[in-house]
């Protein structure tokens, strides 16, 4: 008997998920169904592909060899489906997008429903990382990056830029007072980043010709979204991008301060990706859509 696509997909998903249970959830199948598919595949091949222990699954040498071939087969099938979809001018297939959690929550998630209505045959997989990810290692198709790009072999597309502003909640300012200049700000609770240190250089004129002020945070966090929440909870003064705080300022949840000393320092927003024939149509559809939303 010949191997089926379902059996190949079950095998690859079990390895990628780390367990039969997780694979069943990812494939929306029963645990017993995935287990039987894996057993059938091993019987057809007359080889043990995976050693099962109570703690984990481990690939055999035969499994390692077969996994590489299985991935190629499934990828070729996905490419073929994408080619047909391109012929019909309807982008289709899976698109994995990674972004830092603030950008994901404020600039992508609100528009997923509208994107799905326009491109129902594209399946989005969204991940959030606060640090730069390796696209190949994490199997990411598009990564959104805020700030200057490092030299790399990746293709890049500009999606615009976002201004940073110094902000605090009305509750914090009512309790501690509003700093009238940069010097007074140093006596306040400042919320900053754990890394990189450059994010704690705020775009404020210091009165001595400098255009950035290095702050020492009273409390620091790795995620801009965590810093936003701290500011909303009257935790102190923060410096954050407008893409994640504009709605808060408009609603009065946060107030921009020290605008007279603020430099118009804008962080570029870019999408980076590897050029891929099979991904081109759905990547272009997503980036065109996102660029339009950001411009609006």
Image (spheres, rainbow, N blue to C red):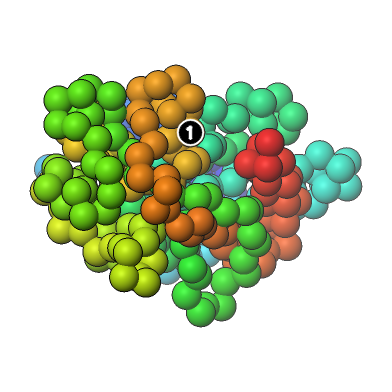
Using residue 128 as the reference point, say whether residue 172 is left or right of it: left
User: Disc 1 on helix, strand or loop?
Assistant: helix
Q: Which residue is mark 1?
A: 246
The residue drawn where x is 70% and y is 29% is 120
As displayed, is residue 179 above or below residue 153? above
Using residue 226 as the reference point, say whether residue 129 is left or right of it: right
Instruction: Report the label total.
Output: 1
**Residue 2 x, y percent position in the rendering:** 59, 49
**Residue 83 x, y percent position in the rendering:** 80, 52
Q: Note whether residue 33 is visible.
A: no
Q: Nearer the viewer, residue 188 or 119?
A: 188
Q: Note whether residue 260 is visible.
A: yes
Q: Where the C terminus falls, by quadrant?
A: top right
Q: Nearer the viewer, residue 108 or 126?
A: 108
The residue drawn where x is 49% and y is 68% is 148
Q: Nearer the viewer, residue 30 or 296?
A: 296
In the picture, residue 238 is in which quadrant?
top left
In the picture, residue 46 is in which quadrant?
bottom left
As displayed, is residue 139 above or below residue 240? below
As displayed, is residue 204 above or below residue 32? below
**Residue 65 x, y percent position in the rendering:** 42, 68
The residue drawn where x is 36% and y is 31% is 255
The residue drawn where x is 37% and y is 61% is 205
**Residue 231 x, y percent position in the rendering:** 25, 34
In the picture, residue 189 is in which quadrant?
top left
How packed is label 1: few (under 14 Cα within 10 Å), some, or many (20 or more)? Answer: some
């Amino acid at each position: 008997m010949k191997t089926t696509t379902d059996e190949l997909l079950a095998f690859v998903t079990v390895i990628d998920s780390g367990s039969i249970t997780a694979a069943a959830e990812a494939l929306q199948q029963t645990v017993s169904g995935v287990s039987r598919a894996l057993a059938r595949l091993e019987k057809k091949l007359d080889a043990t592909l995976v050693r099962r222990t109570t703690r984990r699954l481990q690939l055999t040498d035969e499994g390692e060899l077969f996994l590489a071939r299985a991935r190629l087969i499934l990828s070729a099938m996905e490419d073929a489906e994408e080619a047909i979809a391109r012929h019909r001018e309807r982008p289709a297939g899976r698109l994995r997008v990674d972004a830092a959690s603030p950008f994901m929550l404020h600039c992508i998630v609100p528009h997923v429903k509208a994107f799905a209505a326009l491109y129902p045959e594209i399946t989005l997989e969204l991940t959030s990382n606060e640090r730069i990810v390796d696209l190949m290692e994490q199997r990411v198709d598009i990564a959104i990056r805020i700030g200057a790009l490092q030299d790399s072999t990746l293709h890049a597309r500009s999606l615009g830029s976002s201004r940073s502003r110094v902000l605090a909640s009305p509750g914090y300012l009512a309790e501690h007072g509003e700093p009238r200049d940069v010097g007074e700000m140093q006596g306040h609770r400042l919320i900053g980043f754990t890394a990189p240190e450059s994010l704690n250089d705020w775009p404020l004129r210091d009165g001595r010709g400098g255009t950035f002020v290095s702050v020492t945070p009273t409390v620091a966090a790795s995620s801009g979204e965590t810093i936003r929440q701290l500011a909303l909870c009257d935790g102190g003064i923060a410096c954050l991008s407008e893409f994640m705080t504009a709605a808060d300022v408009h609603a009065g949840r946060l107030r921009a301060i020290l605008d007279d000393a603020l430099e118009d320092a804008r962080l570029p927003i870019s999408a980076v990706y590897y050029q891929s024939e099979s991904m081109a149509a759905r990547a272009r559809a997503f980036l065109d859509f996102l660029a339009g939303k950001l411009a609006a």
